[in-house]
Image (tube, rainbow, N blue to C red):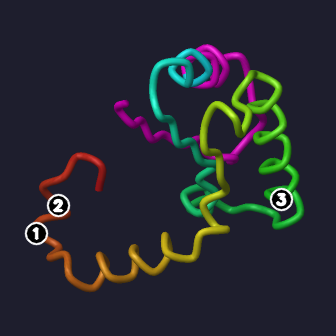
């Protein structure tokens, strides 16, 4: 079975655009693919935030995804900051990736 990985930032309140653009599609994909979904809270730390508010958004984001059918029996769902290897791997990439390569990427 093919695998799909995607994530959602808890940088604001979940709205209809999140549901239509991602969550509903994730629920459909979970029927036919081996899906791994994440709340990418480390990515959301690029803007100013309050720690307790971020924690609340993470819980709300997880609850909405679970309520939409993304249950543990259908997919893997995790919070990015709970997997220390994400930050460790980012550190390694930051140390070995030349700035010239980064500047050629549209995401940088």
Dot 3: few (<14), some (14–19), or many (≥20) neighbours within 10 Å?
few
Residue at numbered disc 3? 55
Dot 2: few (<14), some (14–19), or many (≥20) neighbours within 10 Å?
few
Question: How far is mark 2 from mark 3, CA to CA?
Answer: 33 Å
Q: Secondary structure at mark 1?
A: helix
For the residues labelled 2 and 3, say whether their Cβ atoms are less than 8 Å apart: no
Q: Secondary structure at mark 3?
A: helix
The quarter holding residue 103 reads bottom left
Residue at numbered disc 2? 103
Looking at the rendered image, the quarter that the C terminus falls into is bottom left
Residue 2 coordinates in the image, percent (x, y): 35, 32
- Where 40 sits versus 74, above or below? below
Residue 67 coordinates in the image, percent (x, y): 82, 26
Read off the magenta span. Answer: 1-25
Q: Secondary structure at mark 2?
A: helix
Q: Which mark is residue 100?
A: 1
Looking at the rendered image, the quarter that the N terminus falls into is top left
Q: Residue furthest bottom?
A: 95
**Depth order, front residue of 50/43:** 43
Residue 34 coordinates in the image, percent (x, y): 47, 34
The quarter holding residue 12 reads top right
């Amino acid at each position: 079975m093919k695998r799909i990985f995607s994530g959602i930032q808890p940088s604001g309140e979940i709205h209809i655009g999140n549901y239509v653009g991602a969550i509903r599609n994730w629920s459909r994909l979970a029927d036919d693919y081996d899906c791994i979904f994440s709340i990418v809270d480390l990515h959301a730390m690029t803007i100013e935030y309050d720690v307790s508010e971020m924690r609340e958004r993470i819980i709300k984001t997880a609850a909405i995804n679970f309520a939409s059918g993304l249950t543990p029996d259908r997919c893997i769902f995790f919070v990015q900051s709970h997997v220390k290897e994400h930050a460790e791997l980012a550190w390694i990439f930051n140390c070995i990736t030349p700035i010239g390569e980064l500047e050629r990427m549209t995401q940088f």
